[in-house]
Every structure is written in structure tokens, then in C-alpha cells.
Amino acid sequence: MLGSGFREESIRRGVDFGARLIGCDAGTTDFGPHLLATARSQFSRSAIKRDSGVILKAAVQAGIPLVIGSAGGAGGDANLAWMRDIILEIAQENNLHFRLATIHSEQSRETVKELMRKGRVIPLTPEVPLTDDAIDQSLHIVAMMGAEPIQAALEVAEVVVAGRSSDAAIYSALPLKLGYDPAVCWHAGKILECGAAAVAQRAAPDSMVAVLHADSFDVFPMRHDYRCTPQSIASHTLYENADPFRLTEPSGTLITLQSRYVAIDDRAVNVSGSTFQAAATYGVKLEGARLVGYSTIVPGAIRDPKIIGQLDAWLERLDENLRERLRMTVGDSLKYQLNVRIYGRNGVMGSLEPQDRVDGHEVMLLWDVISPSQELSHAIAASLSHMAVHNPIPEWHGLISGVAYPFAPSEIDRGPVYEFHLNHVAIPDTPTSLFPAEVETV
Amino acid sequence: MTIARLGDVAKLIRSKNAGPFWLTLDVMFDDPVVYRAVRDQQVVSVDVVSRLYRQPTERLKVFAHDSALAIKVSMPRPTSSGSPLDSDVFGGQQYAPLLDLEVHLQEDMPPAKPLPRSEEIE
């Protein structure tokens, strides 16, 4: 992934080998909804600039196209502008000249509402309720482009910086345009999108090369100390996919049930036998983020076995006392959420935890107050932390101090918090209609 | 016959988000004999995962991936990644309950025959 690093010599080796395209995925939803919501990048500008500089110079000097997808991380317009700016700066500093296409993937609320009205926004599983109000709350919405907008950009530019993109489309767009078998293009793209993640033992991120044939492709790493094995390549269809045999793309589904993975030598693997089933309806995934509120957290720990032994009752009592106090101080109709994660019981897995009990001798409580303002969340958290420390249990007679706070102040303001609130596919007029591009000569 | 824990015989057991709304767990092996035993004994089945993770069976998908020597489980996340109620933004620490599942291994199991094609298993 762009910004996570790779060796310059690996890129050079790939170009010397005769690469006809350099592709790089720059995005993910992994880090959370805040990056889309706030148009920020997980990786620093200098990290992105270093990686972009290596591939931009290599591509321009070799006269081959460069495609960067999901620019800026989330692929919104501000992320895209940030990435374009970095590309222009690298070009200027290195006296590089090329045509640059910038493909937008951000969707206005009106566009999405219009698609909804036409019945062209289809929920995926798990179904997330979607209303006009939910759309209005969106800070940013992006649609995930397939190969077609990138192909159109490659007609008029050598360097393509694309907004939110299907990871595999970054690599499949060019060979699909050249007429290669869609199954070969999409499966190769799927393997390449995480670079050296598909090697047997990866020490650090690096790059991979795929060589496409009529009905199969070969894949191998550029670092000499990395190896691809049939198992490591087959395993990559497991990674981050809910279904390893049916990988959905806007234009259809890559089916790997019959795929064969054969070692060519001790570092390279040939993949054949995949099929691509064209979709009846072309659909692009939507991603959206909205503000949930402002969070103040309070971490506190308990060592007393008498309190730990009745944790639920103790928490319930605390909740009652807190609500009563808040009615007196900030009013009845208060809109706030109070969540508590109990580390030492089910703090990591929550409702999925099979051993929903305390086995150890101490627990960590992490309270999270979320309300429409930071001030209110902080006020609630301040009452909470004071009440919690003195929250009584029947076994002790007299005032107790039952919570160990590791920090003073005990309340930590976390600022705005967000959530992904779209799990939908949109049916566009055409594969390129939601993805306008700008072309400039650099 | 010996009884082994998956945590002791798997090459890698991991979990991860598959997009913000899905969680996916992979149990991967090096040895085709062990993989086949786990697959054929349905050590990681929809019913087992349903009980362990307290999820209704209709929310679960379980796959046997013969080329990867891996069993895969996918389920919708209880809450989307990074949202206020989430406790594991990458979904990376949700696999531990699978470590204690048990597989029966015969001392002199025959070498693995070519595996049939991968499939979705119930």
C-alpha cells in the first residue's frame, strides 16, 4: 500500500523485467471511518511522497503508465487533491513531464438521494438502514470505481490518480483494455493489490510482478529473499475477503473454485482455471461516514475481589445513580450513550466472547461517553468518574474508593467520533458516470 | 489416535475485517493430512462457530479452501469497524476461541490423496 513502503530496487527490477504498468493501491477502510470523515491520510505526507516519488520516476522514465488507486486513503475529493498536489510537487522537483488524469469518486448527497429515489441503491448484508436523513448526515460519500474509469483515463494520460477504486481494478484496467481474459486480469489484480502480502514469509511490504498469458498468469516477488508458493498465492484470496471463491467486482464476479496454483520454480507460481462471471447489473459499492458525537473516555481498574465478584450489579447501581444525578444537573431528555468495555472479561470480543467471565484478579473498565458536544460528554464523564470511585457494595460498610484511575485527569476528551453508515451498492447510468476525470499536462 | 488443539497444529489462525461490516477468520495449515482431518471432521463447522461466537447459524459462512489448506469463517460484525461500540478496529483479535478446538489425528495417517475441489461446507 502506498505509504507503507517498498524497496526502490524492487521497482527498478520490475521495470527492467519489462513491466508494462506500475499500479499501487493507496487506500483501505481498515483504520476506521475517521479518515473518510475528516479527509485525512493514515500515512504522513512524507511517507506518501517517498513511495510516490519512486514509482512516478520509474514509470515516467520507462515510458509506462502509473495507476494509483484510492488516492489519499479514503478516495474523497480532498484526499484526491492532497495526492495530486504531492504528484505535482514530485514532478516539479524532478523535472518530470506527463499527462495526469485525476478521477473523482466522491458523491454528493443529492446524487445518492437521487439514486435512492430511482431504486438504484441496493443494501448489502448486513443491512444498514438508509434514509434521506442518514444521507444528509454523511460527511463524505465515495463510490468504489471499477476498471472502466481507469481505462478511460489511460486513453488520455500516462499517470492516473484515482479516487476510491476496487483494489484489483488498479491492475486489471490496462490488461482488460488490451483484451486479456477477464478472469486472468481480475485474479492477477487481486493477488497484486497487497504486493508482497502474498509471499510465504514477508519481512516488510514490497512489490510483486504478474506476467499475463492467454489463460493463466505467473506471479513472483521482486525481492530475491521472498518466495511465492502455490499455497501462499492461493491463500491470498482468503485475505480480507468474506468469500474466498467469489470475489465481487463492479462488472462481475471472479470465481476461484476451480483455480489451479502450480509452482514454476521455488519463487514463482502459475495461476489458471479461474473464471469471471459478468454481472447482470453493473454496481459500485458506496462508502460513507457520519459524525456520531463527541467522546470522553475514562479508564479505571478494579482489584478488589468483592467488587469484581459482583461487577454487573455494581455497574447497574452506578448507572442508576449517574442517571439520577444527570437528571438533576443537565436535564431529563439528555441524549448520550454510555458504553463500558470490561477488559479481563470481554473487552476485546464483546458480544462474540464465549468466556464471558472474569478469570483474573483485576479488571480494566473503559468507559466511553458520547454526546452531541464535547463539553457535555466531559461533564457526564466527570460525574461518572467521581461516582464510580465511591460506588458502594453491600459487603463493605462505609465510604470506599473502588476504582484505580491510572491518569489524572481521569477523563480524556477524544474529540469527534464517526461511523461507517453505508453498506450499499449503487447502480450508475454507466460504469464511468459517477467518476468524472480531469486531465492536465504536467 | 491423538487429540490435538488447532492452536498447536495450525500454521496460522487469524482474524481480520473484510470491509467495515464483515469479520473473517482463517485457520491455515502446512500439512495436508492435518488440514484434511480438520476439514473432514468438521472441526470448524457452522454449528461449532455458532456456539462459540453466539451467532445464529444463518449469519455464518464456513469454507474449506483446499489449495490454501485453510478453513475460513465469515460473519457480519456485531458493529461496523471503528464505530462507537466496536472494540477491535482491525478485527484482528477475534480468533482466540478457535485455538482450543480439537482434531483427532491418527498416528499413521495415510499420506493425503489429491483433494477434491474446494467447497462451502455446512
Image: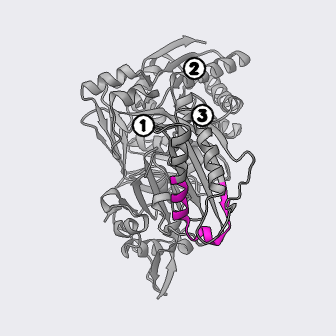
The x and y percentages for residue A314 are: 55, 62
Residue A126 on the magenta span: no
Residue at point 48%, 56% (across, down): A235
Q: Main secondary structure of the magenta part?
A: helix
- Residue behind mark 2: A81
Q: Earlier in the sequence, mark 1 or mark 3?
A: 3
Residue furthest top in the image: A441
Instruction: Say whether mark 2 and mark 3 are on the same chain.
Output: yes
Res. A421 mark: 1
Whole-number angstrom distance, CA of label 3 to CA of label 2? 30 Å
User: Circle 1 marks a residue in which chain?
Assistant: A
Q: Nearer the viewer, residue B81 or B61?
A: B81
Q: Nearer the viewer, residue A180 or A204?
A: A204
Answer with left or right where residue A122 lies relative to residue B93: left
- Residue behind mark 3: A374
Q: Which quadrant holds the C terminus of chain A?
A: top right
